[in-house]
Image (cartoon, rainbow, N blue to C red):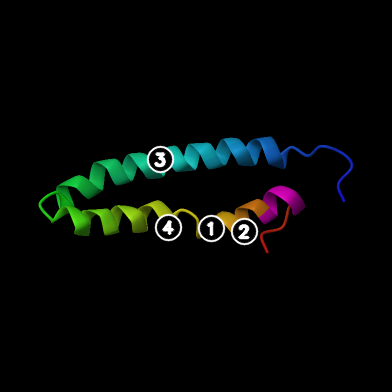
Amino acid sequence: MRTEPTWRIPVGVLGLLAGLLVYTGLVALVAPPLIGEWPALAQGVVYLALGLIWLLPLRRFLIWMETGRWG
């Protein structure tokens, strides 16, 4: 168990927020022209998938924030 603060947690939170901001901006710029003419249900499925994809690297990132290792 950690007894002293580490720099990785605040840096990791700021990095996560920055990464999510960039990812959200890219989705907002790229997706509408590509799927804008699709039916609403199909668009909903795509946006749901894109909304969940960012979770894939999150586990390793959180491990790094706590331990300093990527795995």
Q: Residues within 10 Å of mark 3 (few under 14, many from 20)?
A: few
Secondary structure at numbered mark 4: helix
The structure residue drawn at horizontal position 40% and vertical position 40%, both measured from the top left corner, is 22
Question: Up-down: is 1 above or below 21?
Answer: below
Q: CA distance from mark 4 to mark 2?
A: 14 Å
Q: Give the residue at mark 1.
A: 57
Secondary structure at numbered mark 1: loop
Q: Mark 2: which amino acid?
A: Arg
Badge number at residue 22:
3
The structure residue drawn at horizontal position 73% and vertical position 52%, both measured from the top left corner, is 68
Q: Give the residue at mark 2.
A: 60
Q: Are marks 2 and 1 in contact (CB under 8 Å)?
A: yes
**Horizontal side of residue 71 vs 18, given as left or right:** right
Residue 62 painted magenta: no
**Horizontal side of residue 45 vs 69, given as left or right:** left
Secondary structure at numbered mark 3: helix
Q: Residues within 10 Å of mark 2 (few under 14, many from 20)?
A: few
The structure residue drawn at horizontal position 64% and vertical position 37%, both measured from the top left corner, is 11
Q: Mark 3: which amino acid?
A: Val
Q: Residues within 10 Å of mark 1 (few under 14, many from 20)?
A: few
Q: CA distance from mark 2 to mark 1?
A: 6 Å
Instruction: From the image, give the main secondary structure of the stretch colored magenta.
Output: helix
Q: CA distance from mark 1 to mark 4?
A: 8 Å
Q: Give the residue at mark 4.
A: 53
Chain-order first, disc 3 or disc 1: 3
Secondary structure at numbered mark 2: helix
Q: CA distance from mark 3 to mark 2?
A: 19 Å
Q: CA distance from mark 3 to mark 1?
A: 15 Å
